[in-house]
Amino acid sequence: MSLVYKVCSKDEWKEAVRIGFFSGSVVDVRDGFIHLSTKEQVKVTVLKHFSGQKNLLIIQFKVDKLKTKLKWEISRDNDLFPHYYGHIETNLADKVFNLDLGSNGVHEFPKNFFS
C-alpha cells in the first residue's frame, strides 16, 4: 500500500472537515495543486517549510484513493513528489497525526511514524 502525506495547520484541516474537502494551504492555492510528500520526504518538508510552526497535523492518504488527480512531478532535489490537482475530500483521509513542536523547537513526529 502506497501512502502520501499532507502537512497543514489544525485550523486548515478543521475548516476542511467542516466543508467536506481540502482545497489546500496558501502555497497550494498559489501553485495550483496540493503539495504532498511520501513518508521518505515528509521530514525534510517539515524542516524546510514548517520549521517552528505550532498546531500542525500530518494527514495520511492512500495513493489508490487519490490516483485520478494525483501526479508525480520532479521537485526538490530532482525527486518525484506527489501533487494533487483539485480538492481532496476529507473523508479520503486514512489517518490524522498530530505534529507537535518540542520545547527545543524541533517537531516531534508521532511514535512509530517512520517504522
Image (cartoon, rainbow, N blue to C red):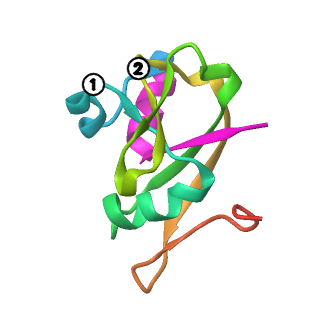
- Residue at 24% from the left image edge and 31% from the top image edge: 31
Which residue occupies 39% across, 80% down? 105
Viewer-nearest residue: 64 or 95: 64
Q: Residue at x 24, y 37 (%)?
A: 26
Residue type at mark 1 is Gly
Q: State yes or no: discs 1 and 2 in contact (Cβ < 8 Å).
A: yes
Q: Residue furthest bottom?
A: 104
Against 113, residue 87 (above or below) is above
**Residue tagged 1:** 32
Against 75, residue 46 (above or below) is below
Q: Which mark is residue 96?
A: none
Q: Earlier in the sequence, mark 1 or mark 2?
A: 1
Segment colored magenta: 1-18
Q: Neighbour class for label 1 at 10 Å: few (<14), some, many (≥20)?
A: some
Q: Which mark is residue 85?
A: 2
**Residue 61 in the image, given as x and y percentages of width and height:** 64, 34
In the figure, residue 85 lies in which quadrant? Answer: top left
